[in-house]
Amino acid sequence: MKWQDAALGMAGVIGSSVAVVHGILIQRLMVRPFEEFFIADPRLFVGGLYLYGAVCNLWVTRGPHPGWMLMAVALVLIALGVHKSVG
């Protein structure tokens, strides 16, 4: 085995190890807190997805387009539905 083959093999082992550790840390430190927040009120999760979709659609189309406009209307309706009226 040449030293280049060994170097590529070691790079693969190091890259795989870093990916696994990174995945574990992301799951533990970022995903679980978000899951707890969104499980508490799933409407906020849906609203966040609509907001993300509307902003991305606006950014891609760069102008008036029915896609982001309708998502924005749906987002307003979600916000009205989440807000609980008193009385």
Image (cartoon, helix red, strand yellow):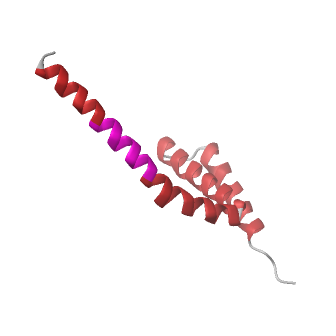
Residue at point 74%, 68% (across, down): 82
Residue at point 77%, 66% (across, down): 81
Q: Establish if 57 lies above or below 32.
A: above
Quadrant containing the N terminus is: top left
| Of 77 and 52, the residue lying toward us | 52
What percent of the width, then of the height, locates residue 28?
49, 57
What percent of the width, then of the height, locates residue 37?
62, 65
- Does the stretch in magenta take in 20? yes
Q: Is residue 30 visible?
A: yes
Q: Establish if 44 lies above or below 17.
A: below
Quadrant containing the C terminus is: bottom right
Main SS category, magenta section: helix
**Which region is colored magenta?**
14-24
Left or right of 21, for residue 6: left
Left or right of 52, for residue 44: right
Left or right of 56, for residue 20: left
- Does the stretch in magenta take in 74? no
Q: Is residue 76 visible?
A: no
What percent of the width, then of the height, locates residue 64?
56, 47
